[in-house]
Image: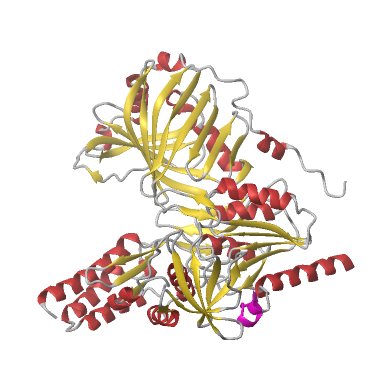
Amino acid sequence: MKLCAIVLLAAATHLTAAELPKAETLLDHYVEVTGGRAAYEKRTTEYMSGSIELPASGVKGKVEMWGATPDSRVEMMDIEGVGRIETGTDGKIGWENSAIMGPRLQEGAELRFHLRDATFNEPLHWREMYKKEETVGVENVDGVPCYKVIMTPMEGKPETWYFDQKTDLVLKMLRTSVTSMGEVNGEYLMKDYKDSDGVLMPTMMIQKAAGQEIRVKFTTITPNAKIPPDRFVPPAEVKQLMTPAPKKGS
Amino acid sequence: MTPDERQRQLDSFDHVWQTIHDKHWETKPGGLDWDRVRAELRPKAEKATSTAEVRDTIREMLKRLKQSHFHLISAEAMGGLNDPYLGDGQPGFEAEVIGSDALVTRVDQGVAVKPGWKIVSIGGVGIDQRISAVHAAYAQSSELSLRLHQMLQARLSGEPGGTLVIEFLDGADHPATVKLHLREPKGKPASFGNLPPTSLMIESKQIDGEIGYVRFNLFLDPVRLTRTFSDAVTGCLKCEGFIVDVRGNPGGIGIMAAGIASWFVDESGQRLGSMYTRDSTLNFVVNHRPQAFLGPLAILVDGASASTSEIFAGGLQDLHRARIFGTRTAAAALPSVVERLPNGDGFQYAVANYISEGGRPLEGNGVQPDEEVQMTRATLLAGHDAVVDAAVRWIRTKSKGSAKQ
């Protein structure tokens, strides 16, 4: 996901905190307007594919993603001139593998961030994932008035979500990702919500972080896709890292 | 100045000020109140009676940053530096500006030229004039060596199949004029985004079967470069040492510095350094590869080793993992841009800061070799690469030291 060059304008609003909708209400409405709990719960796996692009530098590629309940996910990006970058988690371990950096097991805060991020049917689980949520005002996103909600996760830095006042859809998020290169502040725009077997999902995400803009567009979304049993098993190069090194002197 | 000229000069002042205001990695560039700088210097530019006075005012503004890579290049100097690449064709030898001479440093088989020959002219244009022009424009810049390198490579370029007439002074200082057919570029095509298609040249060998050696001209095509390092390292795990040669390498994909470094460290999580943009700090973290080379590591650099090459060499130097041989690097570790101003002058500026793990900015400073070694005409004529020789000597000394223990 990425941040697009949004001009975020503070809307002229005189709503007081008491007049703003509760964050809890907005979050529950979001589940409802995107299909409702029953529609989400019918989905136990998912396959998505599409394109990834960094327009400023002309870098393009393909992206595929497999997910399964409760928190397994593998993403593969094939970037022109770079090769394949794979990230994955089986809900317990997290890994990365790429030509540039080689295989790597995630640890600590980065692993915990990845595990949280991989939560399947995430909108249903906000109560387990966030310890505090508060509506703090109204701001425009691309000219659309949105409720601004501060979401404080169980671990990590607070996020800001923007709910379209009319549709209750989330149009934008500000969040700090924990990566191997450190914490990266990013803005994420969610666009082109489309129905996928009863669940409304953004099919275009624009992320802006560290001076880069990344556009991800999903053209195929297959709910309850048949996923090979070994899809969430780390690749051999990563497995090699999981074998404890012999103790020195032994 | 005519009214139009005056306006172009003021527009140029404004463009420089605004660019730094919008794009500098610090919200207070150089720790300054940037609005106050404008309030103080804009009236001075308005009162200027000549182009030179406006340039002086802009330079004063840039000087206050006390940061490298912020330069005003006069339009005259910009025009004099017009040495565009004319194609991918290569003359069958490599050359560098060493001291004040353009010298042949390597020669492909079958080319009637020898290392150490001095280039006098290329296509009828005296090379001394071009060297002087670059010196005049970049005398105060940390990028002088890099610019000299780029000028010479451009002068030696052309379409494959074309010809280039080059005058040399041979080893005995006798004039030698050679007509060379430009060859297809060495290496294989590599591309990345909007970068123009280029060729990635990789040379991998073992010196005397005891020392690994990899030279490559760009940090691109990670799949191919990773395969090369994988083969070179795993085939050399018991070698006395390893040499990575990034002389003349202008960089490429920044994070590849950490990727290549990962073949030479024994634990994950070490950092080469950090890049600071206005909204994030990106750490260049190195992962340990399951099969890594952990013996003596030498990295060869020169004034044309830039950007990713500097991040790679500077980071491993700071981690005390490598000994650096050659000459100071280009001091151009950051993405920097040269724009044309409305008055025709050039304006160079950086958009991020990079601090190596040891706490030093590489921008404007470069990587200072642990062992300063310069190729000379005499050593080249004798058939030696003095920088490789120095690295080999050091590795052998380390190896003997280990054997005695």
Q: Residue A8: x, y in percent?
A: 27, 45
Residue under the image location 43 percent in, 47 percent down:
A185
Q: Quadrant of residue B376?
A: bottom right
Residue furthest to the left:
B3
Residue B376 in magenta stretch: yes
Q: Nearer the viewer, residue B264 or B102?
A: B102
Say whether residue A230 is left or right of residue B296: left
Res. B405 visible in picture: no
> With respect to residue B193, does B393 lie above or below?
below
In this rendering, is residue B11 above or below B189? below
Pick whichever, B20 or B376, lies toward us.
Answer: B376
Determine which quarter of the picture holds residue A10. Answer: top left
Image point 36% across, 28% down: which residue?
A202
Residue B266: x and y in percent read 71, 53
Residue for point 70% across, 58% down? B205
Check residue B155 for magenta coloring. no
Percent coordinates x, y for residue B313 in the rendering: 60, 64
x and y percentages locating residue B155 in the rendered image: 43, 70
Looking at the image, which residue is at 51% across and 54% down?
Answer: B199
Kindly give the residue lying farthest to the bottom in the view shown: B173
- Quadrant into which the C terminus of chain B falls: bottom right
Is residue B284 toward the left or the right of residue A60 in the image? Answer: right
- The magenta-colored residue range is B371-381
